[in-house]
Image (cartoon, rainbow, N blue to C red):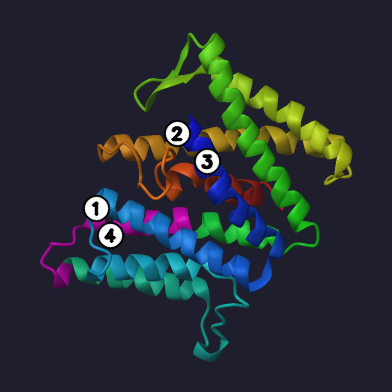
Amino acid sequence: MKQRIITAVIAGVPFLTLTILGNWPFIIMMVALATIAMNELLKMKQVKSLSSTGVVGYLLMWLLLLPENVLPFGWLHTNKLELFLLLAVVLLILTVITKNNLTFDDAGFMLITSVYIGFGFHYFMHTRFLDNGLALLFFVLILVWSTDSGAYFAGKSFGKTKLWPEISPNKTVEGAIGGILLAYIIGISYLLIVPVFSSWLMAFLFIFAVSVAGQLGDLVESALKRHYSVKDSGHILPGHGGILDRLDSLIFVMPVIYLLGFI
């Protein structure tokens, strides 16, 4: 626990500082974190980063990650979606060129992984650059961390009913409920100081969506690690594992709240 706290402080201070600063320092941090997270997933799949498959995977992810004002495509007379589809076709062509050393399953993995990482960090950036983006982003961060803490302590104290033992044997229904409850307690306290939403109904729905999506994001990464028989996605953060271990809930939440129309 002591090591987790020390790592959280050492990593958290620059993360929050660059998020507050915004602009290019923030964008560079997002690109770096997304690239490391992509590398962690490639290692799970045992794909070399500098292989043709790995390179295409990074290109797909960066394409979805970077906003249009950073990565303009007007001079190519095309858009990001068309380029993404072109690279998807290239992946399928590689299954033929490599004589199935790159399988159809591998190609599917790269596409899903690039969407998972690329859009997750993209909408984190998208939210930061909204008019009230910083306040909203801190609200999301607080809700995700509150949910994690509430689920952990409620699960330790009251957990009896397994939530999804085939995926994450330590998670319980009581822990999940505790995470949602603490998210509401901390979230409402935050809103009394920083009124992010004009409607309390919208705020209550937002808190619920973030808390539930955050826990689902954690389960998604647990399912990935169990499938590939790894304990942690990486070792860059002592006591926490990899970047994906630390940010799995967050990068799952951001596209969800975008699709639900909250941002």
Q: Residues within 10 Å of mark 2 (few under 14, many from 20)?
A: some
Q: Which residues are magenta?
A: 96-117
Q: Most extreme residue toward the left, as rendered?
A: 99
Q: Residue at x 47, y 70 (%)?
A: 63
**Which numbered tag is attached to residue 105?**
1
What residue is pinned by disc 3? 6
- Give x and y (percent) for residue 180: 65, 26
Q: Are marks 2 and 4 in contact (CB under 8 Å)?
A: no
Distance from disc 4 to disc 3, alpha carbons, whole Å, reads 39 Å
Label 2 residue SS = helix
What residue is pinned by disc 2? 219
From this view, report whether residue 74 is shown above or below residue 256. Answer: below
Q: Are marks 1 and 3 in contact (CB under 8 Å)?
A: no
The secondary structure making up most of the magenta span is: helix
What residue is pinned by disc 4? 107
Q: Is residue 171 magenta?
A: no
Q: Is residue 210 visible?
A: no
Report the amino acid beneath label 1. Asp
